[in-house]
Image: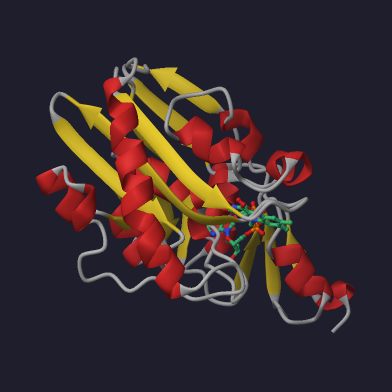
Amino acid sequence: MALTDVNVVVPVSADEALAAFGDGTDVTVVAGGTIVMPELIAGRLRPKRALLLARAGLDGITRKGGTVTIGAATPVSALEDGDEPLASAARHVADLEVRAQATVGGNLCAEASADAPRGDLQAALIALGATVRSGGKGGERTEPVEDFLANSAGRLVLDVSYEEAPRQTGYASAWRPHAHHYTILAVAAAKRDGELRVAATGLGPRAVRLTAVEQSGNAADALGGLEPRDDALASAWYRGQLLPRLVERALGMLDGAEHA
Ligand SMILES: Cc1cc2nc3c(=O)[nH]c(=O)nc-3n(C[C@H](O)[C@H](O)[C@H](O)COP(=O)(O)OP(=O)(O)OC[C@H]3O[C@@H](n4cnc5c(N)ncnc54)[C@H](O)[C@@H]3O)c2cc1C
């Protein structure tokens, strides 16, 4: 299939993007394209319609009325100096070039590949208690990140939001030294008004909330019934050994300075 065979739609507003997306049938969303474009060029992905989000006005970060809202098409690089633990997670995504192109919405919708996990921002957003606003079948929906990740098919992500408030935060990760830097496993934690939220990325296809650790505050409870993934970066056994250590490090950081 030649790229010219694809029906390319370039909406210039969020409403146009939602209308073009419809219920998502036969639509391939292209945001930064760092995952989609290589698949398309290699012929592994054969979309009927490609919905390009670059001009849909879905980028930008706003802080209003105590809420931080990040547009789906905001580049990952724009988060690097922002709120923790999201900023640390963003700084660990790939390299400079990829971070400038890759988007927040693409990261939320990224499935792990057979070679490496993706979606590093997901755990940090769960730790922040963020919600996702999306459109698609049944209209607009706003829900916690973890609920969205469990049921994201046929949704067009519009933005993510979380409360702007002082929190104690921690982020610990392990990665393979490589020009492109893929994360093996990462843990994000945030504590606010006594409520602890902890999540991990790299254990499975999507980030998971570590509720047992949230309840006990004990890193030894991290794995619970979870079965870590096996891939080209690391074995399931290695990830199982690593997880409690990363949780311990992330929890240990919570006693440090509060981040707004
Ligand atoms: C060399 C290299 C290194 C990488 N390293 C990392 C890493 O360390 N950590 C990491 O997390 N990722 C990594 N990635 C993967 C990728 O760059 C990121 O996950 C990135 O954030 C994806 O965003 P994107 O905008 O480029 O997504 P795209 O490629 O545009 O899209 C990815 C998926 O999300 C869907 N999508 C995109 N936007 C939306 C939306 N708004 N609503 C609904 N669906 C949408 C697309 O249809 C597609 O299925 C790497 C990629 C490369 C090429």
Q: Is residue 220 left or right of residue 149?
A: left
| Circle count | 0
Residue 250 sits in quarter = top left
Note whether residue 139 is visible: no
Q: Quadrant of ligand 1?
A: bottom right
* Relative vertical location of residue 241 with respect to residue 130 in this rendering, above or below: below
Q: Is residue 254 left or right of residue 89?
A: left
> Which quarter shows the N terminus?
bottom right
* Relative vertical location of residue 170 with respect to residue 147 in this rendering, above or below: above
* Relative vertical location of residue 37 with respect to residue 189 in this rendering, above or below: below
Q: Is residue 237 left or right of residue 106?
A: left
101 and 95: which is toward the camera:
95
Residue at position x 72%, y 39% in the image:
100
Q: Where is residue 163? Give x, y as percent.
A: 30, 27
156 and 13: which is toward the camera:
156
Q: Where is residue 188? Give x, y as percent.
A: 37, 42
* Relative vertical location of residue 250 with respect to residue 153 in this rendering, above or below: above
Residue at position x 78%, y 50% in the image:
179
Q: Where is residue 14? Give x, y as percent.
A: 55, 44
Note whether residue 241 is visible: yes
> Which quarter shows the C terminus?
top left
Colour setting: secondary structure
Q: Where is residue 158? Give x, y as percent.
A: 48, 46
195 and 12: which is toward the camera:
195
